[in-house]
Amino acid sequence: MDTKLQTFLILCRLMNYRLTAEALHLTQPAVTKQIQALEQLYNTKLFNYDGRKLQKTSDCIILEQYAQSLQYNYEEIKKALKDDPEIFIRIGATKTIGDYVIGKSVTKYLSNPNHNLSLIVDNTERLLHMLDSSEIDFAIVEGLFNKNKYDFQLLKREQLIGICPNSHKFAGRTLSINEIVTEPIIVREAGSGTRDILEHELKNLGYELNMFRKIRYISSFKLIRELVSQNLGISFVYSSVIDSDNSFATFRIENFNHDHEFNIIYLKNTSAKKYVELFVN
């Protein structure tokens, strides 16, 4: 892996020459020189300043994508040269999927004595960052992502539904968006795939999250379920989160797209697909 490309990737992540120099224990002029060498090599401009803010050019974004794939493949070479029969997969999963969807797949994969894995459960934003940095082999997400940047495979489709107590006036109904916003709502933290999808669908209906009477931000599904059961707010979760739990009622919104994808995503031009197939199959 060319050290100039390694420097380039860190600068793409930090978007600051001084911080990049500190991260690499180099001087700032040394970082600048490496980036200039890449610009001369590829005969293009990689970064521009908008005022004092560093920005990526379109060519920079293209090079970043290829450099990320190269970095992943470089790590794969080192792994392939080890005389070790164990197949170790690094997986990232969003909270819905990690806690409620892939348990059986993990159990089945680990039933082979030569298989091992690490599973990190985090929000979509954080997982995409880890994927770009080659910290995981693939991510399984329910959130929005750039389908032009990554290769991906559909895992399943699932319903994003409203939940409330059985005694709630919304129970079992299909409601207008105007009725929904009169209630307090409990949502996940910023960067969560569930929240991104919810905000995206609300926007398609001409609404925003801040139009709800009151918003409560909770990252724990366990606590969200508890608060909803105590009638302290409605929430939107994927159907697997409540499964067949009869203590919750569900509701729907008119003209709201409740059907969404769970996707396995990985870097383009890498061997990560073999790990995806091994885990899924």
Image (tube, rainbow, N blue to C red):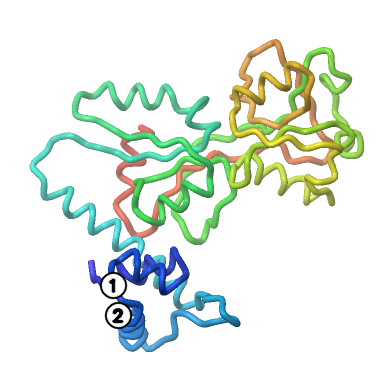
Using residue 149 as the reference point, say whether residue 279 is left or right of it: left
Secondary structure category for the residue under label 2: helix
Using residue 195 as the reference point, say whether residue 206 is left or right of it: right
Residue lying at 73% horizontally and 32% vertically, measured from the top left: 186
Find residue 77 and report its image quarter.
bottom left
Residue lying at 32% horizontally and 49% vertically, measured from the top left: 272
Number of marks present in the image shown: 2
Q: Residues within 10 Å of mark 2 (few under 14, many from 20)?
A: few
Residue lying at 51% horizontally and 37% vertically, measured from the top left: 94
Mark identifier at residue 26? 1
Residue lying at 45% horizontally and 53% vertically, measured from the top left: 129
In the image, residue 44 lies at what x, y percent? 41, 86
In the image, residue 76 lies at what x, y percent? 22, 52
Residue contact between numbered discs 1 and 2, judged by CB atoms under 8 Å? yes
Q: Name the residue carrying label 2.
A: 30
Q: Residues within 10 Å of mark 1 (few under 14, many from 20)?
A: few
Q: Which amino acid, by three-letter code, is at mark 1?
A: Leu
Using residue 80 as the reference point, say whether residue 159 is left or right of it: right
